Image (cartoon, rainbow, N blue to C red):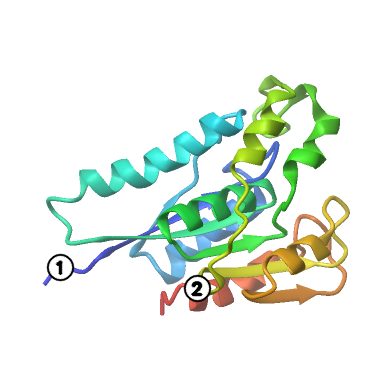
Amino acid sequence: MQVAKKNLLFIHGFNSSPSSFKAQETKAYLSKHFPDVQFHCPQLATTPKQAILQLEQIIVRKTIQDFNSKPDQHWYLIGSSLGGYFATYLSQKYQLPAALINPAVTPYLLLEEYIGKQVNPYTNEAYFIESQYMNDLKMLEQAEISKNNYLVMVQTGDEVLDYQQAVEKYKNSRLIVQNGGDHSFIDYQLMLPKISDFFNFN
């Protein structure tokens, strides 16, 4: 009897990359403790529409490719900051479990001050943020949240996002609120066992 294949899609944040600390820590942890879970972490496109299309294609194409040889595909999401916003959209659309790390709740407001030229510090890619992107982000907003699908972890010392927005947005979900910390989520690696338990990897 074939066992359903497990896939974890890690969605990095704004101006980040697969080389980020959290992405690399997650990959290493899975490799050591859950080698049967396939890790996916693409370098996201710089526009919201392209990024979501890119993420959806990973889920759909991978599932279709293995459809004939595998009885099922299980997908799990981890989203950090803006990646948490994208993960929420995907979780609601495909009803997937998602762990969110200091998730952005209203990025279409936050990113208004970043309109113009940007340079990704990981890739050195130069690109432009356009005002239209705020509307595109707004279109991805999810008013209804499936309470059992989310593990949400925030730190009160987040200097970029108001953690209370996430607490309110996901108040009916499983919440972990840590005092102090910052936007990068200090000691993230210590949370990986909790994330794995939430996903029932054990």
**193 is higher (above) or lower (below) than 7:** below
- Point out the image quarter for the N terminus: bottom left
Element on which disc 1 rests: loop
Expressed as whole percent of the image width and height from the top left, the position of residue 144 reads 59, 61
- The residue under label 1 is 2
Q: Which residue appears at 60% of the width and 33% of the height?
A: 48
The type of residue carrying mark 1 is Gln
- The residue under label 2 is 196
Q: Which residue appears at 30% of the width and 45% of the height?
A: 62
Q: Which residue appears at 69% of the width and 68% of the height?
A: 153
**16 is higher (above) or lower (below) than 30:** above
> Dot 2, crowdedness within 10 Å: few (<14), some or many (≥20)?
some
Which residue is the extreme one toward the front? 143
In the shown orientation, is residue 115 left or right of residue 91? right
Res 85 label? none
In the shown orientation, is residue 96 left or right of residue 142? left
Decide which of 147, 50 is in the foreground and name it. Answer: 147
In the shown orientation, is residue 109 left or right of residue 31? right
The type of residue carrying mark 2 is Ser
Decide which of 53, 40 is in the foreground and name it. Answer: 53
In the shown orientation, is residue 3 left or right of residue 54? left
**188 is higher (above) or lower (below) than 137:** below
Element on which disc 2 rests: helix
Decide which of 29, 156 is in the foreground and name it. Answer: 156
Expressed as whole percent of the image width and height from the top left, the position of residue 42 reads 49, 40
Of pointers 1 and 2, the one earlier in the residue sequence: 1
